[in-house]
Amino acid sequence: MSQQQLEHVFQQWQDNEAQAEEMIPLLGKLYRQYNVIPSLFGRSLINRSVTRILKNHRYVRKVEGTELTVADTLPMVRAMTELDLGPAHIDIGRLAVAFKHAGESDVRAFLERELADIIGGHDASGMGGEPQDVVLYGFGRIGRILARIMIEKAGGGNLLRLRAIVVRGSGDDLEKRASLLRRDSVHGPFSGSIDVDRERQALIANGHVIQVIYADAPAEVDYTAYGIDHAIVVDNTGKWRDREGLSQHLAAKGVAKVLLTAPGKGDLKNVVHGINHATIGDDDRIVSAASCTTNAIVPVLKAMDDEFGIVHGHVETVHSYTNDQNLIDNYHKGDRRGRSAPLNMVLTETGAAKAVAKALPELSGKLTGNAIRVPTPNVSMAILNLTLERGTEREALNEYLRQTALHSPMHKQIDYVDSPEVVSSDFVGNRHAGVIDAKATIANDKHAVLYVWYDNEFGYSCQVVRILQHMSNVRHRYLPATP
């Protein structure tokens, strides 16, 4: 490559950086002024760096086969800021690809047609509903990630207000609580600032005052004393998993509903968003968000059953170790879990295969499952070994899964990657319930094996927030609409 060619390539990169820099405040305006949540084929564009925006554009070429640059999307973003849009999730990548394929030249005219339903629909109140108070009961791994996500989303008409966290203790550990939210060995630093208000016994995260309440039992808390009412309590302790135990929260003043971040027992609805969340009724006061593994596999299993039919199958989960295991060998009431988590692969049971039937009754009795805990702190994999009613081959199966990840109503749940180099750490922070690894797919007529990565902390927490939004009657418009 000549010196002139090298300089041209570098200049092109700098031009792209400049356009991405110009795009950032426009994206912020859409988000904060119009409650428009912009993305690029499911990749959020809010609070993203210049480099991340450019990488998101490159992702489009990998999954869609269409070259898309900031030169294609910047004119769209500019035009959108002038259209007085109503609240919605808008995938600018999908719009830009459609615009290129249509061969049109007038961006504004194209957007006026594609976004006609929300133009002139701006509502300063966001999604048109009332803000929903949310309380996190427990502040462990899932609790802190939920806090991060809700604080991040607070500016886009989300209407979920994180008002308090409830923990055990005496009230002298605010600094430690703040530090754990501020720094995370897996997910990195908190995006913003966190201050401790000792007088109010609260954390202030990016301007949000989060009351810290100390209690030993759910029913002893009076949330109304803190100005919190009709709240949804998210129990992420895992201590109670049935209706009787979780009903203790409903005995507390100011609580309207309870969401459990673990598989529910008995008659509790186990909900996987994108699959059966519509079954949540206004009279459902206690709901389970199932498990991270159930959330990862159910959307993929539904996609497979819809297209090919599942006769039977086995789910093997390769799962990162969790907080209920021991760092070194010590007593544990569970089989094998007493052995050192960082030093061993630990064979254990999983209820995910049976739990699938609660979200997909048509698969009841068709799946078996086991789990292997491995010495990684986050990101897991589910291996789906399936016998199908209708045969297929690898290329056709991967293409179907790619289209499902990009264009189906489950595009928030299913992601897709086709790279020979990805490993578990590459999926830290992925917001989908599960990610299909296309290079690993095996298909031979009626036998298929799928490998599904999932961030068992962050991806699962995103699913929990989606259920929270549904329980709060927060209804987002998604444009352009999926088939």
Image (cartoon, rainbow, N blue to C red):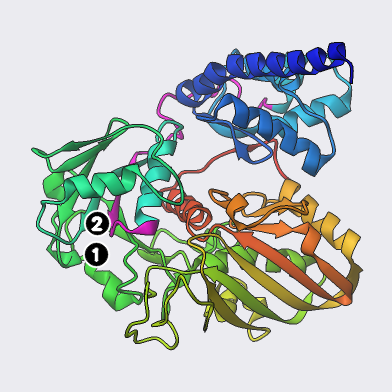
Q: Give left or right: position of 184 versus 250.
A: right
> Circles 2 and 1: CB distance less than 8 Å?
yes
Is 182 placed above or below 98 here? below
Residue extent of the magenta highlight: 115-141
Q: Position of residue 408 (x, y in %)?
A: 72, 51
**Which element is circle 2 on?**
strand
**Residue at 34% from the left image edge and 87% from the top image edge:** 333
Which quarter of the picture shows residue 38? top right
What amino acid is labelled 1 in the image?
Answer: Leu
Q: Which element carries disc 1, helix, strand or loop?
A: helix
Identity of the amino acid at label 2? Val
Q: Which residue is mark 1?
A: 250
User: Of marks 2 and 1, which one's residue comes earlier in the chain?
Assistant: 1
**Residue on which disc 2 sits:** 255
Disc 2 to disc 1, how far (Cα)? 6 Å
478 left or right of 15 in image: left
Residue 444 located within the stretch drawn in magenta: no
Q: Measured from the top left, where is residue 274 in percent x and y?
A: 59, 57
Residue drawn at point x = 39 percent, y = 86 percent: 334
User: Residue 79, can we see it?
Assistant: no
Q: State whether residue 221 is above or below residue 228.
A: below
**For residue 378, above or below residue 199:** below
Mark 1 Cα shell of 10 Å, populated few (<14), some (14-19), many (≥20): some
Give the class, few, some or many, for how many residues have Cα within 10 Å of label 2's Cα (few <14, many ≥20).
Answer: many
Residue 425 location (% of width, % of height): 58, 53
